[in-house]
Structure formats: structure tokens, C-alpha cells
Image: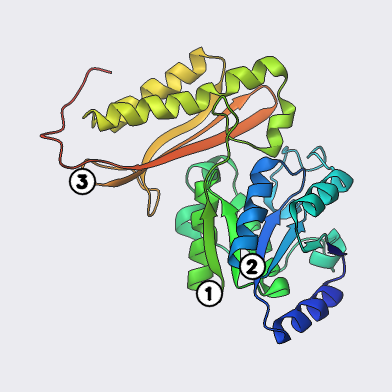
Amino acid sequence: MVTFENIANLRKYLYQARMEGKSIALVPTMGNLHEGHLQLVDQAQKVATLAVVSIFINPLQFGPGEDYKGYPRSFSQDQEKLRKRGCHILFSPQIENMYPETRISATVVKVPHLSHIHCGASRPGHFTGVATVVTKLFGIVQPDAAIFGLKDYQQFLVIKQATDDLCLPVKIIGSPIARTESGLAMSSRNGYLNATQKEKAAGLYRTLVKTQLAIENGNCDYDALSVKASRQLEQSGFQPDYFSICRQKDLQPATIKDRDVVILAAAYLGKARLIDNIRFTVNLTLPKYRHYDV
């Protein structure tokens, strides 16, 4: 595995690789890698000749009072994990490489209709920071494909929309959510949880599954289902941020006419802000949707 900090050196290396006919897949990360990240590396190796992983803790996507300074950093361990997993190139720029003058970006990328709802409502500016840094990484690496985990489904849609709108020649690939045996979605922020909290945290996924089953059994009162789920999370020790039943394509509230549905949830447990989702297709061949007492 080759490691680069300098943008020009990375570009020179990748230019030569392209001249040799090699394809490139990028996995953008903020480090503190876990098995979910490494599964993205596996997928990158399947779709391209070279798997490039970036590690950059992007200050632009952290809001006031969020955990930028305290975000877990484990670069040496990350290097070793990537090396063992067969990663070809690690790109780990410093802030001055990515934002050379003001340490922030003078030019930003916004996807307005997807960025102000759900996580965007709780974290103003977050998705502008994500879209901006990912666009910069695409310009630096010029990958044929980029792999993103679907745990943050809203982020995936934001990046896909920005890529399409800006006509960037990058195939955006979503990778299934990696989970522990308990069902907890793997996340770098799970490191904030103690052993007891980790057991409790799996309740977020169980609530998603329970809500999905209610919908599949004919309950179409989505507002009531969301309220009930939020109340159950609160009773279990979570501090719910949102619990929303949406259309997969644009994250607008789902109706009984919508077939492809995603349930999005975010909740605090201790210091950790956990997000998760579950996507499924509603069976419209059911006899008739019924309203249930929830």
C-alpha cells in the first residue's frame, strides 16, 4: 500500500496508473476505521483495479458544538487495517492541503432540497460540508467509481444528486449497512458507547424493524407509527432526534401510494448520536390498507 499526503504526488501516481489502463475506485472516510469501512474497501477492489481510501476529518461538515476536536483519530491502526485488507493507495491530506488559504472552502457545493431535512435540520450546513469535500476528492482522485455505506442514506442521496447535477464521471455505489450481531449499525461514533450502552443501542434497529413489519402488515398511519417509535425509543433511554417514514427517492414523507420506502432514524444515547435506516418495498398487492390503533 502506498500512502500520500501531497495532492500533486497522488495525481502523478494515478495518472501513470490510468495510462496503464487501470481503473480506480475511491472510498472516502474520516478514519477510525471499523469492519464496515473495510467492507467498502472489499467492494472497491471488486469494481476497479486500484482501491483508493481517503482519510480526512473534514472540519466543514462539523457544526458548532459538534465533536470535531474530539472525533476519534487512529491513523496508525487504520493504516495497518487497510494494508491487511489489500488497499492499494491511502490518501491522507492535511487541512492545509484541502483548504490551503482560509482552512475553509471559499467555494461550496449545496444540494438544497435534500440537505435541510432530517439530519440536515439538526445539523445545518453538514451536507454542504459533505458535498463540498467529496466533490474536491473526486477532482483530486478522478475515480471511476466511489463507494459509500448506506447507513447514512441521506448522505448517499446528497452525493449522488451532486454527482449527477455536476455531470461528474463517477459511478456512485451504495454498500449495505454493516451490523454487529445485535443489529447495531457499525459506526466510528459507537466508540463513545460503553458496553451497557452498546447493548441498548441495538434497540434503534429493532424499532426500525418493528415499524417496517407494521407497515407490511397493512398499517398505513405513518405519522402515528413515527410518534409511537419515537416514544418507544425515549422510553428505552434514547433521546430521539427524528424518526421518519419517507420515499426512498427524495426523502419526502411517504404516503400509501409510495412503493419504495425508507425509515430514517437518529437518536442520542449518551455522547453518541446514532443514525440508522431500513429500506424496503411495500407490497401493494395487499387487499386494502387498514388503519390500526398504534
Q: Position of residue 194 (x, y in %)?
A: 73, 20
Check disc 2 and give the amino acid type. Thr
Q: Marks 1 and 3, how far apart in space? A: 31 Å
| Left or right: where 2 falls relative to 198 | right
Q: Residue at x 60, y 27 (%)?
A: 268
Visible in this render: residue 78?
yes
Q: Where is residue 93 in the image (x, y as percent from the top left)?
A: 83, 62
Q: Residue at x 84, y 77 (%)?
A: 8
Q: Residue at x 59, y 47 (%)?
A: 124
Task: Work out whether mark 1 precedes mark 3 in sequence or the reverse, and give the earlier one.
Answer: 1
Marks 1,2: beta carbons within 8 A? yes
Q: Mark 1 points at which residue?
A: 166
Q: Marks 2 and 3, how far apart in space? A: 35 Å
Q: Mark 3 points at which residue?
A: 257
Q: What element carries label 1?
A: loop
Taking the view exactly as shown, the residue that stands out farthest to the bottom is 19
In terms of depth relative to the viewer, which is nearer, 157 or 234? 157
Please say if 123 is above or below 214: below
Please say if 120 is above or below 92: above
Marks 2,3: beta carbons within 8 A? no
Mark 1, other Cα within 10 Å: few <14 / some 14–19 / many ≥20: few
Q: In which quarter of the image is residue 131?
A: bottom right
Q: Which mark is residue 135?
A: 2
Task: Work out whether mark 1 precedes mark 2 in sequence or the reverse, and give the earlier one.
Answer: 2
Q: Residue at x 16, y 32 (%)?
A: 289
Check disc 3 and give the amino acid type. Lys
